[in-house]
Image (tube, grey):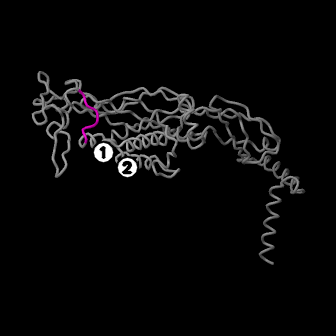
Amino acid sequence: MSKRDYYKVLDVARNATEAEIKKAYRRLAMKHHPDRNPDDHSAEEKFKECKEACEVLIDAQLRATYDQYGHAGLEAARGGGGGRGFDASDMFSQAFGEVFGDLFGSGGRRGGGEQVFRGADLRYALELDLHQAVFGDKVDIEFASLGECETCNGNGAAKGSRPVTCATCGGHGQVRVSQGFFSIQQACPHCRGRGQTVSEPCDTCYGQGRVRRSRTVNVDVPAGVDSGDRIRLSGQGEAGRNGGPAGDLYVEIQVREHPIFERDGAHLSCEVPISFATAVLGGEVEVPTLDGQVRLKVPPETQSGKVLRLRDKGVKPVRGGSRGDLFCRVAVETPVNLDAAQRKLVEKLEASLRGDPGRHSPRGQSWFDGVKTFFEKIVN
C-alpha cells in the first residue's frame, strides 16, 4: 500500500466530489498507463498508485476511514474485511478499454485473438419506506438490459450457420495501421475486434449477439440504509461482448418521506401534540415508534417546543455503531370550539394568573421587558 497522501496522488482537494476524483484518475491513468510507457518501471508504479488512491477515495466508507485514521486505519479496515470492493480498474477498463485495445493491443482477449469487452454497469433507483430502510428487506426489482441472445448463444449467427474467420484480420481481431512514422494496432474495422464475421445474422439479435429484455433481480436490502447509499450486485449489469464478463448493477437507495418521523442519520424525530392541562400539570402520552407504541413522560410546566428523548428508539446504522434515539418535539395544543361554560373557566384562570405575570409567565414577562427597553432606547 502506498504511504503517499491519496489526495496529492490524484491532485484533488480533500473535499473533491466523486466525479472530480474519477476525472483526475482517468487523466493520470491515461498518462502513466504501462502500455503507453513500455519499459518505464516508474510509470507503472505511478499507475498502480493512482489506481489505489482512486479505489479508496471513491468508496465512501474507506474514504471516511482514511480521512480520520490515515493509512493505519485502512490497513486495519482491510484486515477486517472492510470496504465494498470498488475496483478502479473496472472504471478504467469501461472508459478506456477499447482505446488501449485499439492503440496497444492490450485488453481482454480469448482464443483465436478475439477481443472481449466487459458489459456496461447499470444503475437502478430503488425507493423504500422508512420501515424497510431501518429494518432491511428483500425486494424484487424489474429492469431492462442487454443480455446474451439465447437463440444464437451470443455468437450472432442464425441457426444452422456459424461465424467465420474474418478475412481482413485473419481472425486476430486487430490490424496494423501505419500513420507517418508510427505503426499501431487497432481493432479490425470489418469485424470490430471479434476476429469473426457473420454471413447469416441471427433473426433475434440481428447479428449483435445481445438482446434487450426485462429481468427481475432480488435485492437484499441491509438494515439501516439511508438515501444515497448504493448496493452493488456484481455481474448483474449488461452482458459483455464477445463473451466478456457482465457489468455490475448499482442499486441506489432513496427513502420516501414518512408522515410522522424525520430521519437524521441514526436519529429520528417527530412532533408530539399534548393538551394544555398535560403541559401544565405533567403526565404521560402515547407516542409511536418504529417498534410500536410507548408512553412518554411529560414533566410539569413543559413549554411548547421542548424536546424529550427516547433512547435507543432510532436507527441502527448499516455500517455499525449503536442505535440512535427518537427526539419528540412537544407542541402544546390550544383548545378550540369551546362552549360558554368552558370559556368562562379559561377567563377565570387567566384572571387569576394575571395578578403575578412574572411568576406564572416568566418568558412572556422577560419578552415584554425587552420590548419596553428597546423602545426606550429609540425614544432617548
Q: Secondary structure at mark 2?
A: helix
In this orientation, which residue lies closer to the viewer: 331 or 322? 322
The image quadrant where one finds the C terminus is bottom right
Q: Nearer the viewer, mark 2 or mark 1?
A: 1
Taking 157 as reference, is 261 left or right? right
Q: Point out residue 12 in the picture as x, y percentages from the top left corner.
A: 47, 51
Which quarter of the figure has residue 320? top right
Taking 9 as reference, is 30 left or right? left
Label 1: which residue? 36
Using the image, tell me which numbered label, if any, was put on residue 322: none
Q: Is residue 375 magenta?
A: no
Which quarter of the figure has residue 236? top left
Q: Reading the chain from its start, which is encountered first: label 2 or label 1? A: 2
Q: Point out residue 134 in the picture as x, y percentages from the top left corner.
A: 57, 32
Q: Point out residue 45 in the picture as x, y percentages from the top left corner.
A: 41, 41
Count numbered badges in the picture.
2
Q: Point out residue 89 in the picture as x, y percentages from the top left corner.
A: 38, 37
Q: Amino acid at mark 1?
A: Arg
Q: Residues within 10 Å of mark 1 (few under 14, many from 20)?
A: some
Label 2: which residue? 27
Q: Residue at x 77, y 75 (%)?
A: 378
Q: Is residue 318 visible?
A: no
Q: Which residues are magenta?
A: 104-110
In this orientation, which residue lies closer to the viewer: 318 or 73? 73
